Amino acid sequence: MKKLLVFVVLLAVGAGAAYHFGYLERLGLGGLRVRFIPKDPALLSYFAPDTRELLLVQATELDFRLARESQDKLVQEAKDFHAKTGIDARKDVDALAVALGLGVVRGHFEWSRLSAFLQSEGYVLTELGGVPAAVKPQAADVALDGRYLLIGPQGELEQALSRKRQGQGLGNGSPLVKALDDIGWTHALVGGVLSGSPLASFQDNVGLSAEFLLAALDTVAEGIDVRGIAGAGGRFQGEVLRVALEVMRKALVAGAGLDSSPQARTLRTSLEAATLETDAQGRVRGTLRLPYMLADQASANLSRASLPQAFQTWGQTFKNEEPAPSGQPSADPRPSASPAVTAVAAPVLLDWKPPVLGLILLVFALVTMGAQTRPGMFNVLLHPLFLLPFLVTTLGVFVFRWTGHAGGAFDVLALPMPEWHRFVSLPVAQPLALSATVPMVFALLSAPIRVLRRFAAGLGVGFSAYLAVKAFAGTHLPLIPPAYTLFWYAGNALAALLMARLCLPPRRAK
């Protein structure tokens, strides 16, 4: 009965940990986790309350039916991006919100993988507002706040984190949020621009005047539905705006008629079927349906983009600028790097998934022992010969993260022991380090040297937990084919746990 109770508790804790750390998707139970949050207050809270432009993309609702060539390009780019950063864009990214100077991505991100990729791109790891971050001169900086990945200039990231902590971000009382409430948030893509935004300056060029412009995009079986709302301030102004837009639509139809290509004919048919109407408040509403073949060429260009290039392009837009208190960029020069930034080279926040999973695996190993020989869990866990290797294996020598030691060997020692393969530049070092080789060696040494049994058990449980986390994350390994990566991690995690079980000393007889 006790074993059954322990098993039920262990199963409940494991299910809760899988839900908390976002592993339900990889376990095939993604339906239990809600990914579509139309109006996420936490996501909006990073933006200034006087923000006058916003684009929100619900990645879980986008379903473009593209041509095979474009789709293959996107899939290949996504695989390469996943191998470099550990981010599966389809499974890990839920939503994206963008304003001038700041972008926020909601999802599940593994900072250890992402930070290693950013370092390879010339970024310096640091801390902003109490969260891990990466900065680079003349480029967009990055910070990870739980499930939210922030991208933008360093000063804007610090202000965004401060707004989130103090509850002073974009809320229901903000003019932009009130305007977007009119068109609704349950769309694959929704965005708006208020008058006064730099993005609304095109109105002066075309001779149109509007208090706000809103747009929403949805994917349906026939194509892409686009809906727009423009507020002119009154019924008469709305009619004037509608007539101007109608003239522009007819001009586009006439221009498309001059081209005999299939894309032009399809575009002309879509423009002819578009609607424009004015309501009693003077708001002009329009609808347009675009077949998927029109988005094929655009998707082919998008598939050639990559995250490093996006970071560089975005960073060039805001380089040498610091955000003003209102949230808009100003012309103040931006320092290339501060002494505090260059002094910190390791992620500050610890990854608690391996030690938590290690405790669960330790309980599981003890349950498999007989009642007469099973030692107490805390007697095993709190023994120095078990606890020290267990912590070093799952967390690394984490005290270096807070003592100010950085650079060289300190950066590697602050990582979990399986990552110490970075001391050696050989390609085979990483697969051997991320395997059961080290705990197996100490398990063999503990046979003649019995004092090493607890040490070998701590290493075995720690390696098993760390490799299991890597298996869930789908981390790429050199020299191991991607199709066998999961089997590599899972098999070595099981072997390390078996070594730990064999090395656990039994309870002493009274």
Image (spheres, rainbow, N blue to C red):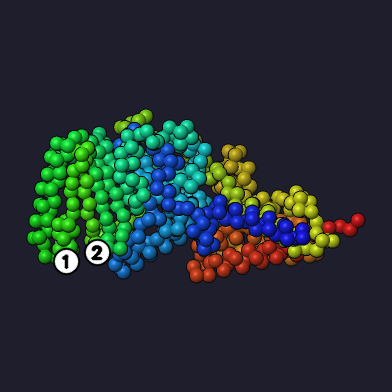
Q: Which mark is residue 383?
A: none
Q: Residue 301 lies in what quarter of the image?
A: bottom left
Front position in the image: 179 or 53 = 179
Residue at 27 percent of width and 63 percent of height? 222
Q: Residue 424 lies in what quarter of the image?
A: bottom right
**Quadrant holding the C terminus:** bottom right
In the figure, is residue 1 to the left or right of 284? Answer: right
Crowdedness of circle 1 by 10 Å Cα count: few (<14), some, many (20+)?
Answer: few
Q: Which mark is residue 293?
A: 2
In the figure, is residue 395 to the left or right of 329? Answer: right
Counting residues from the N terminus, which is met first, the one under dot 1 or under dot 2? 1
Rendering coords of residue 393 (x, y %): 64, 54
Answer whether residue 309 is visible to the viewer in this image.
no
Front position in the image: 271 or 447 = 271
Rendering coords of residue 60 (x, y %): 40, 55
Amino acid found under the numbered disc labelled 1: Pro
Amino acid found under the numbered disc labelled 2: Met
Which residue, given by chain and number where applicable, does mark 1 sit on?
262
Name above or below for residue 293 compared with residue 411: below
